[in-house]
């Protein structure tokens, strides 16, 4: 049964019952044993929510990727109290972002690392879906262009213009599922708390649109904000008024895009909020193994039931998905190996070596279309006749095992290096790439080799690229201020902690030498960007991955408040002030922090307000986090004054000193490192030398390790056995669809299709006329904006999962059909006309439509629910969180009333002549106010 509301309810209900029963037993056992240690799961609501999310993700691994994507990318109407305006980022901006990425990579990396410059620009929609989001109460009438014929969405956007704080939110979901719809309630809450507006982007997702497609879309979203195209419904947003925010994969994407902006010298945002960012796709940090029992992430990773889309190889190779290394000379573990070509390979590429070399140079390569750099040729040549099956230590000690062997490294050889002097050199130059090897725990053991792609976001050879795993960046210095939060129980904890310290101390945590040798830009960055990035790191006790999902907990309430204060601080203060102090905790007296939404509203421009006779729900929910924030802020200020926080050298610049003297700030803080307990109170983090993740050597980071690789393989073997019949059906279906795709192309040619496979548009419009709103389309015309289609990729080598280069699944066929018949690129000189027979056939095809463009991949286009919107699983989850919030608030109030009654009763028994050390019970009005604050 595919992922749906009904199937989710059936799968999750037993988990709810089981968790309830186990929770009572565990609490009783703790009470009996006198265990007073607090645990986040002592709260029944968090315990239930944790296991519900965990069960849902586990259910997703037992279904196809497309099924999970469709469910989590279903359009769900926004709540009545939110203002949501959908827009579509046009090709004009998409092309700007593409040009920036092309500049960042350079021609050589584009060919060898990415696989070309066109395939990742191919998309099914006429732009990128996005939404402007804010609270309805914040809308104003200022700035509306009266007299113009505006749509309701355009009018909403213009009514948001007075809100100058903007959060660009990038949702998470393992880079392959999730959408704006799964995160809309969280985004609305952020916008309400920082009194501004949010812009959320529904980027394309893997495996149909793997790296760098999501990076391209997020970069386009940022450029759309700061340099909107003509006729855009919003005015340009100053970069210093924008804050990136993202959770999990969204946090990784946010950080990646900021490094691109830094490298290219583009305007930088005011700061970034990274919530449990996934920044190491090689899983090289220890917590990936140790924290599995305390996290929501499945132990074997994001496996999936076989489908035409994923996995790439539904049936494992005869020799297995993981094998012992059997060919020499192998490179250093974690990098692509090589294999001397067989006679059949040589015959396939041509009998003479020159033809073979030429074919290899043109990108004829397994996997992602990259070939080995030639830097290591001389060091490898004399080792290729060594014995098979050497140990890992021998490989590490071998001159042939240098870090410079990684696939995709830019070639730095001079022209003379292309000349061959003998057959031995020729053989060395023509080795084929092999899958990456695994870093073994025992240095004397023979390394394992991976023969199946382990991550949907990128190929195995790409996982250690700094734009996939930004923790491997040559430098994370010179970035805007970062607020980074993690759960102590999540599997990504160690890489997040390491990331924060690497950003704050670029020279103390250098990049791996191999990364610097393989990428010219990373070497340049390490030398150029040495200014520490200001970082506030918080690790929350007992919390799992993306703790903000559990919005009813004290930890999450404090996190939302802290994020809001960070956004306000970095967007409301100028660069000179932020250079001295980017942290709101050290910015102003505690009393300056607002304690409720009523006082917050006074800071907004004049709006139509209604008097509030009683505290609103939003005010009640804000007060607990406000009290916690004030107390924690005072603690941080005390630590700074006591010199227990890391600081920058005292600035010599008179301007900076003047800025500091004009405020009550405690300036020059470099990094705030804190732990947060389950009640939301902070304490200083332990010293760096006591954190195991920070003791890793640079050469150990970014390597695929034995333990996670073996665990993934064990899970994949279980899935292979469980779905072996399904996998066989998938293989047959793929073959049938490949035949259909060939027939579709031939049919289109018979109907008059003409195109230039390797051509470029004769002219490209600089000003886009693409639709701004999602409801409009451009059908049956050749596009004026630069656009590529599946038939324009003859010289490209897309990754094997990218539907732009595939013809064996329904989503690839839908993309092909739309490109031919509806939105043809300029390389197409004609649009074919369907014959009557084909129209009739399309009418009876559930995957086609004779009148409208076919639906595009669920990893890109939102689906529509066929049930009542309020009954969709995403809406039910939001309702459940609201229920937990109300119950949690009531629980806190009941506890406060009990404590207050006990105080009154105790004080009544104390003699009036004895000075009381107990607090005076509040009067009726004060008691109500105290209760409201506890909420």
Image: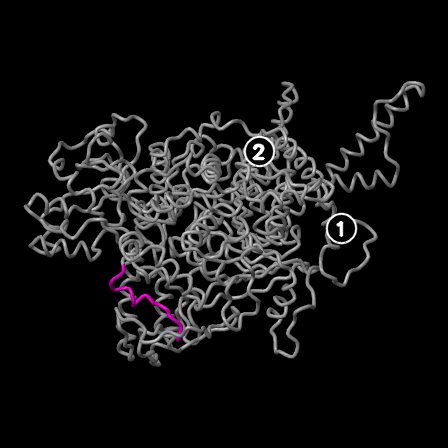
Q: Position of residue 719 (x, y in %)?
A: 37, 42
The residue depicted at 60 percent of the width and 60 percent of the height is 77
Q: Are marks 2 and 1 in contact (CB under 8 Å)?
A: no
Q: Main secondary structure of the magenta part?
A: loop
Quadrant of residue 685 in the image?
top right
Q: Is residue 820 left or right of residue 532?
A: left
- Local packing at callout 1 (Cα closer than 10 Å; few below 14, some 14-19, many 20+) is few
Q: Which residues are magenta?
A: 784-796
In which quadrant will I find the C terminus? top right
* 421 relative to 682, above or below: below
Q: Earlier in the sequence, mark 2 or mark 1?
A: 1
Secondary structure under the numbered disc 2 in the rendered image? strand
* Figure coloring: one colour
Q: Position of residue 523 (x, y in %)?
A: 33, 44
Q: Position of residue 291 (x, y in %)?
A: 48, 32
Q: Is residue 265 visible?
A: yes
Given residues 165 and 679, the one toward you in this image is 165
Quadrant of residue 768 in the image?
bottom left
Given residues 798 and 227, the one toward you in this image is 227
* Residue 674: mark: 2
Task: Find out whether residue 297 is within the magenta segment.
Answer: no
Secondary structure under the numbered disc 1 in the rendered image? helix
Query: Residue placed farthest to the right in the image?
Result: 913
Where does label 1 land, which residue? Answer: 599
Q: Position of residue 822 (x, y in %)?
A: 39, 74
Q: Marks 2 and 1, Cα distance to the nearest angstrom?
A: 29 Å
């Amino acid at each position: 049964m595919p992922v749906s509301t009904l199937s989710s309810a059936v799968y999750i209900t037993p988990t709810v019952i089981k968790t309830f029963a186990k929770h009572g037993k565990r609490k009783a056992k703790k009470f009996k044993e006198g265990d007073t240690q607090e645990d986040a799961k002592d709260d029944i609501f968090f315990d239930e929510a944790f296991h519900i999310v965990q069960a849902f993700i586990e259910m997703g691994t037992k279904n196809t990727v497309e099924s999970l994507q469709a469910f989590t990318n279903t359009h769900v109407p926004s709540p009545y109290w939110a203002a949501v305006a959908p827009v579509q980022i046009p090709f004009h901006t998409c092309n700007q972002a593409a040009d920036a990425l092309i500049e960042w990579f350079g021609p050589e990396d584009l060919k060898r690392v990415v696989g070309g410059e066109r395939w990742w620009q191919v998309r099914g929609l006429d732009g990128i879906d996005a939404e402007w989001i804010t609270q309805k109460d914040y809308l104003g009438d200022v700035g509306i262009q009266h007299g113009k014929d505006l749509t309701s969405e355009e009018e909403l956007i213009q009514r948001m213009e007075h809100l100058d704080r903007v959060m660009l939110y990038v949702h998470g979901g393992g880079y392959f599922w999730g959408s704006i719809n799964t995160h809309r309630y969280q985004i609305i809450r952020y916008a309400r708390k920082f009194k501004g507006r949010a812009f959320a982007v529904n980027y394309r997702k893997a495996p149909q649109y793997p790296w760098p497609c999501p990076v391209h879309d997020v970069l386009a979203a940022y450029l759309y904000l700061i340099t909107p195209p003509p006729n855009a419904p919003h005015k340009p947003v100053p970069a210093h008024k924008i804050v990136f925010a993202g959770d999990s994969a969204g946090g990784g994407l946010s950080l990646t895009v900021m490094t691109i902006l830094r490298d290219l010298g583009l305007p930088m945002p005011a700061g970034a909020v990274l919530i449990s960012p996934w920044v190491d796709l090689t899983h090289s940090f220890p917590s990936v193994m140790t924290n599995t029992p305390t996290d929501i992430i499945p132990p074997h990773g994001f496996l999936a039931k076989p489908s035409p889309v994923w996995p790439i190889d539904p049936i494992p190779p005869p020799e297995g998905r993981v094998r012992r290394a059997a060919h020499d000379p192998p490179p250093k573990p974690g990098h692509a190996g090589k294999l001397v070509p067989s006679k059949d390979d040589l015959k396939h590429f041509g009998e003479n070596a020159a033809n073979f070399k030429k074919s290899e140079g043109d990108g004829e390569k397994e996997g992602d279309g990259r070939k080995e750099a030639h830097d290591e040729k001389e060091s490898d040549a004399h080792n290729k006749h060594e014995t098979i099956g050497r140990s890992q230590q021998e490989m590490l000690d071998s001159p042939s095992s240098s870090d410079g062997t990684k696939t995709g490294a830019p070639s730095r050889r001079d022209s003379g290096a292309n000349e061959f002097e003998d057959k031995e050199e020729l053989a060395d130059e023509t080795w084929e790439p092999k899958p990456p090897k695994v870093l073994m725990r025992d240095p004397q053991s023979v390394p394992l080799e991976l023969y199946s792609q382990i991550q949907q976001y990128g190929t195995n050879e790409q996982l250690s690229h700094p734009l996939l795993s930004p923790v491997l960046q040559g430098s994370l210095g010179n970035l805007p201020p970062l607020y980074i939060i993690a759960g102590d129980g999540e599997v990504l904890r160690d890489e997040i902690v390491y990331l924060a310290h690497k950003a704050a101390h670029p020279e103390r945590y250098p990049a791996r030498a191999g990364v610097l040798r393989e990428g010219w830009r990373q070497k340049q960055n390490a030398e150029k960007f040495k200014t520490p990035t200001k970082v506030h790191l918080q690790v929350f006790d007992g919390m799992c991955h993306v703790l903000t999902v559990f919005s009813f907990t004290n930890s999450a309430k404090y996190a939302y408040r802290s994020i809001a204060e960070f956004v306000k601080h970095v967007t409301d203060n100028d660069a000179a002030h932020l250079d001295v102090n980017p942290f709101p905790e050290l910015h102003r007296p505690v009393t300056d922090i607002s304690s409720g939404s009523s006082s917050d509203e006074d800071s907004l421009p004049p709006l139509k307000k209604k008097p509030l006779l009683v505290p609103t729900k939003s005010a009640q929910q804000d007060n607990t986090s406000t009290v916690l924030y004030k107390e924690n802020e005072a603690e941080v200020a005390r630590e700074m004054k006591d010199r227990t926080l890391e600081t920058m050298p005292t600035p010599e610049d008179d301007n900076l000193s003047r800025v500091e003297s004009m405020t009550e700030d405690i300036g020059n803080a470099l990094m705030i490192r804190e732990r947060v307990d389950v009640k939301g109170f902070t304490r200083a983090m332990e010293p760096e030398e006591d954190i195991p993740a920070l003791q890793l050597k640079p050469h150990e980071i970014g390597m695929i390790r034995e333990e996670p690789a073996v665990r993934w393989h064990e899970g994949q073997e279980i899935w292979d056995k469980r779905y072996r019949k399904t996998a066989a059906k998938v293989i047959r279906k793929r073959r049938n669809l490949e035949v259909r795709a060939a027939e579709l192309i031939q049919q289109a040619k018979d109907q008059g299709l003409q195109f230039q496979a390797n051509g470029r548009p004769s002219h490209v419009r600089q000003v886009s006329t693409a639709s701004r709103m999602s409801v409009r389309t451009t059908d049956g015309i050749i596009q004026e904006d630069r656009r590529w289609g599946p038939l324009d990729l003859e010289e490209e080598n897309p990754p094997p999962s990218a539907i732009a280069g595939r013809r064996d699944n329904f989503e690839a066929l839908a993309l092909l059909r739309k490109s031919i018949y509806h939105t043809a690129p300029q390389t197409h000189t004609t649009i074919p006309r369907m014959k009557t027979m084909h129209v009739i056939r399309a009418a009876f095809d559930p995957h086609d439509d004779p009148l409208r463009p076919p639906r595009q991949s669920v990893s890109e286009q939102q689906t529509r629910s066929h049930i009542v919107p309020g009954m969709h699983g995403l809406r039910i989850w939001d309702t459940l969180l609201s229920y937990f919030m109300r119950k949690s608030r009531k629980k806190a109030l009941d506890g406060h009333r009990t404590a207050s009654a006990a105080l009154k009763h105790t004080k009544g028994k104390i003699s009036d002549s004895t000075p009381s050390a107990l607090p005076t019970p509040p009067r009726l009005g004060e008691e109500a106010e105290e209760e409201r604050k506890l909420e």
